[in-house]
Amino acid sequence: MRVCIVGIGGVGGYIAANFAKSGIDVTGIARGAHLQAIKERGIEIVEDETRWSVNMNACSWTELDGVFDVVLFCTKSYDLVASAEAMRKHTTTESVAVSFANGVNNGDILRAHLDAQVIDGAVYILSHIESPGVIRKKGNIFAAVFGGRGSEKLADLFEKSNLRYKISTNIQKDLWKKYIFIAAFANLTSYYDQSIYHVAKEHPQETQAVLEEIASLAAAKGIDIQKEVEKSLQTALSLPEDASTSMHLDFQNKKQTELEALSGYLVKEAKEYGVELPHINRMYEELVKR
């Protein structure tokens, strides 16, 4: 079974390295110095005090060839459409595709651009590219959740590589269970320029208010994630004190951000469903200027 991981940064790189270490035929798509480093010396994973590396096949879009049985899109949300279009000639109607990008409507985006069997999914992980060819993972959090026709193929890969996963019987709810945490803290960490832990510790009332706003929007869409408010608060306070969100890191490094997927989407949907999001609106209006 041929597997392609589109985007082997913090998320995709960690999964790709574990797949490769387990003997899975995996190809990762990358670019620039990161791609060159992986070609020359393999991909390196740093997990707290543990450091390991593995050789793997990595290439650019122009070097990619053949058809793949399973495709994992681990790009940023703003690159998903272009990546799906580029992947069309490398998939068939029997291929299984999933997006682990931040957001709750990525499956719909893939279905609009691919003829493959698209399943919905999300992944829980704190990781980023530390330097070319090196992925830094923080804490012991890792879990993938996905659901839909074709999920068993993906489950086999995670089983073989000993990565935690779950096939969901209510994937939309599970997507929102992740989204409430990542969207809330992407906004909060970027707005205050602080880590997840420090935001939750120093701005507890506003943190809870933002989580409540996202839960209220989900409720308007028929999805009950109210229990995730308290869970998200506790998770935030249990993380390493310097752990933050990818959107916050992108703002710090003056890179393109996922603001529209993690904030603009909420503002747009709230207007459609008649839900008030005063804290998120204020943050979005400020962050869109940066």
Image: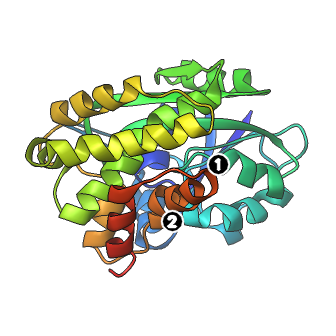
* Image quarter in which the C terminus is found: bottom left
Residue reaching furthest to the bottom: 289
The disc labelled 1 sits on which kind of residue? Asn
Residue 186 x, y percent position in the rendering: 34, 54
Residue pointed to by mark 1: 105
Residue 87 x, y percent position in the rendering: 76, 58
Q: Is residue 221 left or right of residue 125?
A: right
Q: Is residue 159 above or below residue 182?
A: above
Query: Measuring 34% from the left and 31% from the top, which residue is drawn there?
Result: 229
C-alpha span from label 2 to label 1: 12 Å
Residue pointed to by mark 2: 260
Query: Measuring 44% from the left and 55% from the top, which residue is drawn there?
Result: 9
Query: Measuring 24% from the left and 56% from the top, which residue is drawn there?
Result: 189
* Image quarter in which the N terminus is found: top right
- Counting every numbered tag in the picture gives 2
Query: Label 1's element?
Result: loop
The disc labelled 2 sits on which kind of residue? Glu
Q: Is residue 53 visible?
A: no
Residue 91 x, y percent position in the rendering: 83, 49
Q: Earlier in the sequence, mark 2 or mark 1?
A: 1
Q: Based on the displayed image, in which of its 4 quarters is residue 79 positioned? A: bottom right
Residue nearer the viewer, 270 or 289: 270
Residue 141 x, y percent position in the rendering: 32, 30
Query: Measuring 44% from the left and 46% from the top, which residue is drawn there?
Result: 11
Tell me the crowding category of disc 1: few under 14, some 14 to 19, or many 20 or more residues within 10 angstroms, Cα based.
Answer: some
Residue reaching furthest to the left: 202
Query: Label 2's element?
Result: helix
Q: Is residue 93 left or right of residue 143?
A: right
Label placed on residue 20: none
